[in-house]
Image (tube, grey):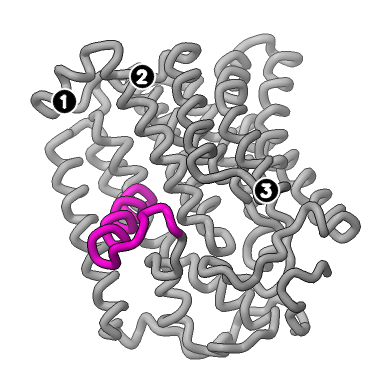
Amino acid sequence: MTFLLVSFFVAAIVSGLTVSLSHRFGEMMSDHDLAGPQKFHGQAVPRIGGIGIVIGLLACTLVEWVVKGQNHLPGMLLLLCGLPAFATGLFEDFTKNVSPAKRLLATAMSGALAFWLLEAQITRADVPGLDWVLGTSIGALAMTVLVVAGVANSINIIDGFNGLSSMCVSLMLLTFAYVAFQVGDAELALWALAGVGAALGFFVWNFPRGQIFLGDGGAYFLGFYMVEIGILLIARHPQVSPLFGLLVCIYPVFETLFSIYRRQFLRATHPGLPDGIHLHSLIYRRLMRWSSGSQRVLAMTQRNSLTSPYLWILCKLSLFPALLFWDSTPMMAVFLALFAGLYVTIYWRIVRFKTPKWMIVRSGRGVSLGEPVLAPSPGKPE
């Protein structure tokens, strides 16, 4: 519990200080773009929440080093390897001038570093033919880098609503921690819990009021950290199914793959262009019916926060079978297919206005976030 508590309190304190400083340095620290296709907030908010998460994890490594003199090396190496992804994303958060390709490349570099320094390598998949490719050094490196960059990017894609990505990552890391304890890997379980603490330290400031955002730096780093824990767990323990990590992360991964398919083949647009019809965006627009169209900050924040629990539930639907069948590749494959079918069904029902009435929120009653204030004009600091 020490790992979780230290990272939680440090991340929460740093995130709180960031929120306070944003009132003074809001022009540099905050996101003033309120009109983009993936913007669902009503006022400028600091988007550098990744700083608190990284410092929270750094505090864990320092405590372990100073107090116990052991178990600190994996955490330090994870932070070191994640530096390219975090720093490039953070630079984008401040400057808004780093292309998606460069951010993806930086995340791939983080994956390559972890491949060599931590031996976080994907060398098996229980898939005929693919296992032969992964048996070569080049094949394992290519697949590992692709998976790390893809999963980290997928966390950034779902990072659009208060508490959505940070809670999903926390649940995924808890799942990894549980299985790590099951196979006797206490060290890896503790670092998974450290990630949970850091994510939740940010979460308390992000949900439900949305006082701080992860930003690209935080989203890419959290995604990197989470997927590396999963890769290390599978690499160290042959009894864990190689598809276990995929089932744990399937919600953001499938969201990304489906978005690429939707943009490329259904809308004939570039798959890298942002749009406002991700599943979480549709839930916000079509299921959060109350105060629809309101420009009041209170109403927009309430609708934003009420969207996330829908996706937390969807995320959990893959985590429960992952916990039960973590050592069975056939069962992993079955539940991966079931999740894909469920996701597509939900998506198309919402798109075609056939959502069950009980899922639609028509009242914000019971959600109290404070007094309403008028939203500022886009581009103006608070």
Amino acid type of the residue that numbered disc 3 sits on in the rendered structure:
Asp
Q: Which mark is residue 175?
A: none
Q: CA distance from mark 1 to mark 2?
A: 14 Å
The image position of residue 198, as x and y in percent, is: 63, 40
Q: Neighbour class for label 3 at 10 Å: few (<14), some, many (≥20)?
A: many
Q: Earlier in the sequence, mark 3 or mark 2?
A: 3
**Real-space Cα distance between discs 3 and 1?**
37 Å
Q: How crowded is the residue under tag 1: few (<14 C-alpha within 10 Å), some, or many (20+)?
A: some
Instruction: Please state the horizontal and vertical placement of residue 295, each as a whole percent of the image.
Output: 66, 85
Q: Give the labeled residue for mark 1.
A: 130
Q: Which residues are magenta?
A: 252-273
Labels 3 and 1: the sequence-earlier one: 3
Measured as percent of width and height from the top left, residue 46 is found at: 73, 56
Which residue type does callout 1 highlight? Leu
In x, y percent, where is residue 143?
30, 26
Q: Amino acid at mark 2?
A: Gln
Q: Which residue is mark 2?
A: 121
